[in-house]
Every structure is written in C-alpha cells, then in structure tokens.
Image (spheres, helix red, strand yellow):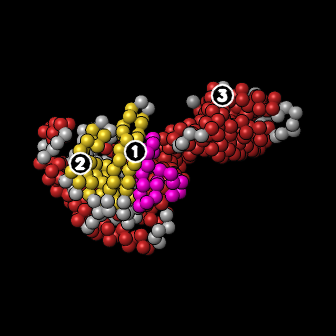
Amino acid sequence: MGNWLISAWERIEKAFLVNGRYAAYLNGFKTTLIISLFAVLLGVAVGLILAIIKYTANHVEKNIILTLLNWIANIYIGIIRGTPVYVQLLIIYFIIFAKMDTSPIVAAVLCFGINSSAYVAEIIRAGIEAVDVGQMEAGRSLGLGWGQTMISIIMPQAIKNILPALGNEFIVLIKETAIVGTIAVRDVTKAAQNVGAITYDLLPPLLITAAMYLVVVIILTKLLSIFERRLAQSDRR
Amino acid sequence: MIDVKHLDKVFGDNHVLKDLNEHIEQGEKVVIVGPSGSGKSTFLRCLNLMEKPTSGHIVFEGKDITEAKSKEVNQIRQKMGMVFQHFNLFPHLTIKDNITLAPIKLKIMTKEEADKKAMELLKRVGLEDKADAYPAQLSGGQKQRIAIVRSLAMNPEVMLFDEPTSALDPEMVGEVLDLMKQLADEGMTMVVVTHEMGFAREVASRVMFMADGYILEQNTPEEFFGNPQNDRLKDFLSKVL
C-alpha cells in the first residue's frame, strides 16, 4: 500500500514539479481561458444579433430585408449546428487562414465564437419567446415603444430563461476548446500531452489537466447559481 | 371621442369583425356583451390598435389613428388605458415600479412625481402597504386593481377593459367591479367587455350585444335587459341571466 502511494506521488511529482513543468500547465491553462473568454464574448455578441433578427422577423411586421436576414441567419445556424466543431476548426485554420499568417489562437477564438453564436442565438431567441405575449401588450398599451418595452420589460424577464442554458453553453465551450492542440495551440490539454511525451507517463498529466477543467467548471456553476438566485428575487411569495 | 368607421378584421380565413360603425361619446360607459368568439375582445383591441384593423378607420379625438405613424400611435395609447383579463403586471418589478415605469420612461413625470402619484393611487385602492411587494405576492383581485391603477397613472382619457374579472376567483370579482364603478362615477369614459351582467345593468350608459362579428343590438341597460328585440340576444340573455 505504502509503496503504491509513494510511486503514485513520484509520478505526479515528475509530471508537475520536476523541471518546473507546472509552468507548462499554467501557460496552457491561461491559453484555454483566453480562448474560452473571447469565444464566449464573440458568441454572445453574434448570437444576440442573430436572435434579434430571428425574433423581429417572426414577431414584428414583415418586410423584405428582415425576411432575407432571417433566411441567412437560419442557414448560418443550420450549417454551424449541423457540422462538428472539430471540422470547423480544421477548415478555418488550414483552409481559410492557410495563406495568412494568423495566430492559431485567433483562429481558435473565431472558430469557437462562431460555433457558440449559433447555439447562443437559439438560446436567446427561445428565452425571449418564452416571455408571455401579454407583457409586450401591457407595455405597448401604456404607450411605450417596441424597443422601450423590449429593454425595460421583456429582456429582464427573458434573462431569467436564458441564463441557465447560456451558462451550460459556456461550460460546454470551455471543455470543447480541448481540441485546439490540433492547430498547434498550446492549451492545457496540449501541455499535458507534451509533458507525457517527455516523461513517458501520460496518465498523471491528463489527470492534472482534467482537474483544472473541473475546477473552472465548478467555479462557473457556483457563480451562475448565485446569479440566478439574485434574479429570482421577484419570484418569492 | 372615438369613431369607428367600416371596421373589418380578418384572421386568416376567419372574418372576426364585419363592417362595424360605432361612435363613443366622452363620459359614456359602453359595456359589450356577447357569446365567446363573437369578436367583442377583438373590437376592443382594435380601438387602441393592439390589433391592427384589416380595413376601416378608428378616429380618436379627431385623429385617424389607423393612418398614424407608430410614434403617434404610442402617444395616442398613453391616453387610452387598457386592462387585460390576465392582468399582465410586470413580474420582475415591484408594485410601485409597475405603476411608475411608463410615466418615468415616457418622461411624463419625474421619478418623484411618479412615486407620489403611485402612492396616492395605491392609497385610493387600499394597497399602499403593497408598494414594495412583487406581483407574485398579490391575490388575483389585488393584481387586477394594481393593473387598473397602473393605467390610471398615465391619466388616460378613456379606459378599455378586456374581460377584467374573467380570470378571478368569484370572491375577488366584487373588489375589482367596485373600483370600476368608482371610476365610472367620476366620469371616466369606459369601454368594457365583460360577462358580468349585473355590472352592465348597474354601470353602463349603453349595452352592446355582439355576435358573429356584428353589433346586433344596443340600448340603455333598462331596455337592453327589459325589452330585448333581437332573437340572438333574447336567446343569449335567457342563458346568462
């Protein structure tokens, strides 16, 4: 038993402490967080625009430009959601950016941002549509404009519907970025593989990496539940 | 005050309102009754363009609102309060904020003025202790009274009621009708779609019977209930009275 523990510790020490190898994980981890953060921001920004296009095209008066934009949004969402993010990453880096001297990190941010935007668009649209139509009518009957009603009355309620699903999307996105090693980004997963290749012992680095993802996801889950509880204030009876 | 000219409304292949012509005077209390699906709610909702008429004109205080730009429509709606069957209070806002949101956002009142007005109105309906509560904490009757107060905060010239007591438990209907009676006594112009025949008899200056998208009969409450002419109305009254 004792021997087993000692050898396990030696393997972890070799994977993490010897030669300052922890720096590789931390740098990789930083890269993972940077890619995730900017991809989330891009995803929410593009997703919000897509959601507004889809919502207005279906719920406000019809016009040709909106119908066309809605059509484009549907094709975009259909293609992005219908193809693997891994394939999208390969296409963006090796084909679209092949001739350009673009940092693979930028390509990764773009890829995951675009991918996430398609899911975020549907999450936001569904969240807005779940708000009772009577809320818009009540706002409009008081003389508020469509935009004013949207901002002051509909969106604050929609956020409550959107947040849990959006949080889930963030969590999925952070974990999905583990494939960016394919385009030579040294994220935390790639760092683990590199260490494993040096020490000829892949299990400890992978466990260390898994633990790092797990910690971030737990922290994020906690933050979201705090935020959700704050938003649920008006539900108390 | 409100003129309705050749109003038609079609939903898909469902012809809901058929060439309605009507005139509502200032100070009138018009109560609209009729079987469900008769178009009475749609008619009411056309008056403030919650429903866009398929054809015809609504003229409010000399202005044709069916021709108005959306900005003008918003301004006209400020003068036409509307109360809904399902209250439609804003669940994420406190009662006071429900009342003050529109006056403040539309820059009709400052925050202080709106707060003062809200507290006056809440005192009037005996709900001043609920100012900081959320809608979920109120009973149905209280919610509907707040919804009425929310409309009143805009100082409307006419109030439209769309089955205001239909979603209430029976014991809460009275408190809402009492508030509506008070408004009527104060001279508010009111158009009310309801199934409360007692209210129609007591408060209305004119009762209107709608069926199949037509206004089939209208009269003073005494004549309407005492001496109905139309066969559909006789049949309707025999079922509801």
* Residue toward you, B71 or A37: B71
Q: In the image, residue B231 lies at what x, y percent?
A: 18, 36
Q: Which residues are magenta?
A: B48-72
Kindly tell me whether residue B209 is visible in this rendering.
yes
Kindly tell me whether residue A226 is visible in this rendering.
no
Query: Is residue B233 placed above or below A237 in the rendered structure?
Result: above
* Residue toward you, B199 or B226: B226
Q: Which mark is residue A203?
A: none
User: Could you say which quadrant of the image residue B183 lies in?
Assistant: bottom left
Q: Secondary structure at mark 2?
A: strand
* Residue toward you, B141 or B94: B141
- Residue A18 falls left or right of residue B110: right
User: Mark 1 — residue?
Assistant: B6
- Residue A68 falls left or right of residue B138: right
Tell me how far mark 2 sits from mark 3, CA to CA.
Answer: 59 Å
Label 3 resides on the chain identified as A
